[in-house]
Image (spheres, grey):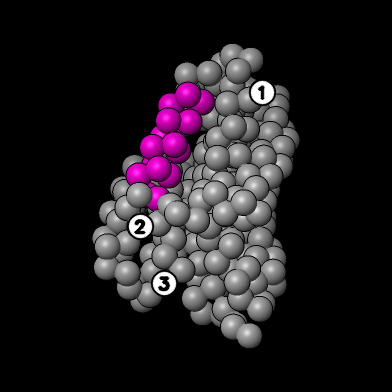
Amino acid sequence: MNDPATSVKATVGYGRALPQTDRQRVLRNTYWLLTLSLLPTVLGAWIGVATGITASLTGMVGLVVFLGGAFGFMFAIEKTKNSAAGVPVLLGFTFFMGLMLSRLLAAILGFSNGAELIMTAFGGTAGVFLVMASLASVIKRDLSGMGKWLFVGALVLLVGSVINIMVGSTAGMMAISVAAIGIFSAYMLYDLKQIIDGGETNYISATLALYLDLFNVFQALLALLGIAGGQRD
């Protein structure tokens, strides 16, 4: 179980606040696209597990491939978010993320209770999203100031993940996973609040931000569950 949550949260530029009707439209389109984005993720994960195509991406090699692909896609999404190509590029990114997740999924499925752990991580991630969405809808305070602190936290998490790859500490992996759940849950609240308050005007950028939050929470939960609750036959 050597796959830390290494995704760096994408920074998103927030424009002027939108009228209420436009805010609802952006939120609605974001939720639809976020739901759609899960399909390529599942497909990529299934192909990765079935073929073992990512099995050799261990240690620093896996980290370099992951970060190179992820940042390349995020750059492309930023460039195409206002065009017809934006949605296909985003869905290509989520397929790539599914492929990258497949190595951890394959390791978890090696446990006798692997399927149960995956479903627990999925349910836990969905629960976190529901809680954060509820909080974002009732909190009146402006949370935009959280962004820079959360980004710093994500960078520190990335550095810690790189170090732990070299050290190979199980305790370090658990600490990183717990920190990732906390940081990206808070990021989820922050990103949802930006959409609700009209700070985010582009639903593709909004979807990318929330997708990264969900992906990192799920990955960290799955890694933590695998370490703490994985059972061998």
Q: Position of residue 191 (x, y in %)?
A: 52, 41
Query: Residues under labels 1 and 3: Cα distance?
Result: 41 Å
Q: Secondary structure at mark 2?
A: helix
Front tag of 2 and 1: 2
Mark 3 is on which residue type? Met
Q: Residue at x 62, y 32 (%)?
A: 91
Q: Which residues fall within the magenta stretch?
A: 62-78
| Front in this rendered view, residue 12 or 55 | 55
Q: From the viewer's perspective, is 40 left or right of 77?
A: right
Sequence-first tag of 1 and 3? 1
**Residue type marked 1:** Asp
Q: Mark 1 vs mark 3: give the one in front.
A: 3
Tell me the kind of residue under disc 2.
Gly
Label 3: how many Cα within 10 Å (few below 14, some 14–19, many 20+): many
Q: Are marks 2 and 1 in contact (CB under 8 Å)?
A: no
Disc number lying in front (3 or 2): 2
* Cα gap from disc 3 to disc 2, whole angstroms: 17 Å
Measure the alpha-carbon separation of dots 2 and 1: 44 Å
Q: How many marks do you count on the picture?
A: 3
Q: Earlier in the sequence, mark 3 or mark 2?
A: 2
The residue pinned by badge 2 equals 59
Camera sees residue 201: no
Which residue does the image show at 68% across and 34% down from the upper left? 33
As drawn, 212 above or below 74: below
Q: x, y (%) of residue 208?
A: 55, 36
Q: Position of residue 222 (x, y in %)?
A: 56, 65
Name the residue beneath numbered marker 3.
174
Of the numbered discs 2 and 1, the one sitting upstream in the chain is 1
Q: Is residue 88 above or below residue 31?
A: above
Q: Nearer the viewer, residue 204 or 169?
A: 169
Disc 1 target residue: 22
Which residue is rendered at x = 70% and y = 30% of the image? Answer: 29
